[in-house]
Image: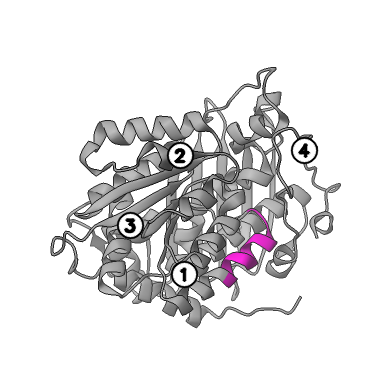
Amino acid sequence: MAKRDVSRRDFLAGTAALGATAMMPNLAFGQTSETMKVGVIGCGGRGRDAAINAIDAAPGVEIVALGDAFADRTQQAADVIKQYREKNFKAPKDQLFSGIDAYQKVLQCDVDYVILATPPAFRPQHLEAAIKAGKHVFMEKPVAVDGEGILKVFEISDLAKSKGLAIVAGTQRRHEAQYLETIKRIQDGAIGDVVSMRCYWNQGGLWSVNRTPEMSDLEWQLRNWLYFTWLSGDHIVEQHIHNIDVCMWASGRVPQAAVGLGGRQTRTAEVFGHIYDHFSVEFDMGDEVRIHSYSRQQDGTVSNVSEFIQGTKGNSNAANRIWGENAYRFDGEKENPYMVEHRNLINGIRSGNVLNEGRQVAESTLAAIMGRFACYTGQRVTREQVLATKGMVPSNLEWGMELPVPEVCMPGKTKIEDFS
């Protein structure tokens, strides 16, 4: 595979432009009641809540179609959205879809943009279908689980740009005023040259779904998707991407390689599939700059969700503080960033100045996948090796298919080449 170089200057310029757009005055907000028809693909908690965020983001938003693999999820989402935002829920019963092909049915409806909130495994496929159908997109992070998926997101993001279609991602810190203000100062040199970074997402366990005798392999794994790498990417990808993304944004760099260690100590029951419960990764960002990344999902442990940026003239928590000769504390207005990201998407669509965060979030997803493979294998894993990994999503999914759970990856035994 040909090496694709991403320079620090190019990456920083791109993120700066997106940040500036996100900080623009809301020229379209409040100035139009033009109807914005939204479809939702993936009706779990995140899809449902994103629909409500979209309604709250701007006037004229209507939820007109919902789709999920499971009919009960589609109906639950419809009931919740209708309960909280009844005037904006306009989806008739014949536009509440279910099944593995539900995404196709939503895209056939008259919608202006779609919310993609299925398990991450399906993001590349659904993004491609949405952009080729001429729809603007809000897609949750992460956006792939393997190198093949990342390359697809790169390709479709470029296609969206050529077609003038928006892609906004669920990395909501990029739309949060306190992060935008603080990181702008970092990029402008307030802490000098960035020399190292630390990021954390350490917490207890999350939800899980026990298997019942009636469930096929596929149904159980889809309902319990957090615990299968082919669906979630493992929790370093599904969750910790947020903090890795902040460090990449602040430094204007993408990782070139990673080493790490991790494992599965406390979540060993069948219900937890085969993913790890802790990761510790060192990302090589070039020029001796490193990110030290720590993520954990273990009950009874200390929680910490944060970032720390060290520079030659000071340091910052990235969120709202800078210490050193250019000390700063954010004291501006705070808004719900989950709502603001939809406002920025809608404003861009209405003004014709659309955002395209596709490559940006794909780069952050790629970094997290790199960290996962470094821990799974115990090897030094490079960007090029990860981009060469094949798709993990089984082809031709059917409800009755056999889908055995893979063995837990073991450092020293598992090789990155096993996935290529």
Image quarter in which the C terminus is found: bottom right
Quadrant in which residue 292 is drawn:
bottom right
Q: Find the magenta span and give its range.
A: 145-155
| Callout in the foreground (1, 4) | 4
Q: Position of residue 107 (x, y in %)?
A: 47, 55
Which residue in the rendered view is the most extreme toward the left?
31
Q: Left or right: 256 with respect to 196?
A: right
Name which residue lies at 66% across and 22% down: 211
Q: Position of residue 10 (x, y in %)?
A: 49, 81
Q: Is residue 153 magenta?
A: yes
Q: Which residue is mark 3?
A: 341
Q: Position of residue 255 (x, y in %)?
A: 60, 67
| Callout in the foreground (1, 2) | 2
Q: What is the distance, in whole Å, between disc 1 and disc 4 at their CAs?
A: 34 Å
CB atoms at circles 1 and 2 under 8 Å apart?
no
| Three-letter amino acid code of the residue under disc 2 | Cys
Q: Left or right: 386 with respect to 25?
A: right
Q: What is the distance, in whole Å, between disc 2 and disc 4 at their CAs?
A: 29 Å
Q: What is the distance, in whole Å, between disc 1 and disc 3 at their CAs?
A: 22 Å
Identify the mark nearer the N-term, 1 or 2. 2
Q: Left or right: 84 with respect to 139?
A: left
Q: Which residue is mark 2?
A: 43
What main secondary structure does the magenta stretch of the protein show? helix
In this view, the residue in front, 99 or 315, is: 99
